[in-house]
Image: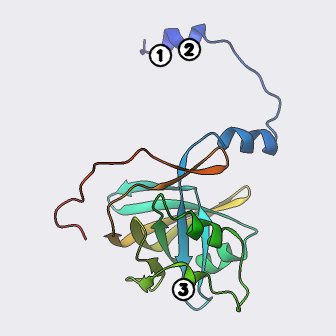
Amino acid sequence: MNDIGPIRNCLPKVTVDTVSSELFREAMSYVASAVSVVTTDGASGCAGMTVSSMCSVSDDPPSVLVCLNRVSPVSEIVRTNGTMCVNVLRDNQDYVSVAFAGDYLDANVDLFVSGDWDRMATGAPAFTEALVNLDCLIEGEMLYGTHHVLIGRIQNVRINVRGDPLIYSARQYRALLPSDRAKPDGVG
């Protein structure tokens, strides 16, 4: 018998016929997520969007998973370019998140004025003031429900500054308590 067998038997069984999109979104609003801006550049154009659905997949090969809403024009640009840079924002960079939260594809609006940007191996814009840049080639994707799920194989990593990530929870930006973590030797 496994260790959770007796616990499972004592929990009340809850039956739900359907879970509405609204109820699910409300439940997920209680989950804290780091905030990132995913950027791309290539034949389909230069674009970016704010995401909170990003996580590591594996360290061998180094890879991340990113979810992009399928109705966003930025999602199509990222997918067809085949590259992305995940820019993990610091706790004082909510202004960058807000700038990239809408689907601004107007050629007259330059979202990249929100700070200093350069390019890494894939050519995707990298926010030099971000906590971390994860430069990726898109190696896998699938459409699930309302989102494209992308797997990015890391081509380059840059840890820019000491700090803590910007967090989004309960439909607002939050910060962690201050960190005393030092930047690892040889990282920069």
Q: Residue at x 45, y 82 (%)?
A: 116
- Eyeballing the image, is 19 above or below 139? above
Disc 2: CA contacts within 10 A as few (<14), some (14-19) or many (>=20): few
State the residue position of label 3. 41
Mark nearest the camera among 1 and 3 is: 3
State the residue position of label 1. 4
Q: What's under tag 3, amino acid-wise?
A: Asp
Residue 36, horizontal then vertical, whole percent = 52, 63
Cβ–Cβ below 8 Å for labels 2 and 1? yes
Mark nearest the camera among 2 and 3 is: 3
State the residue position of label 2. 8
Numbered disc 1: secondary structure: loop
- Eyeballing the image, is 97 above or below 106? above
Residue 164, horizontal then vertical, whole percent = 40, 55
Q: Residue at x 55, y 78 (%)?
A: 114
Q: Image quarter for residue 149?
A: bottom right
- Eyeballing the image, is 102 above or below 64? below
Q: Image quarter for residue 163?
A: bottom left
Residue sitting nearer the eye, 65 or 134:
134
Numbered disc 3: secondary structure: loop
Q: Residue at x 56, y 83 (%)?
A: 112
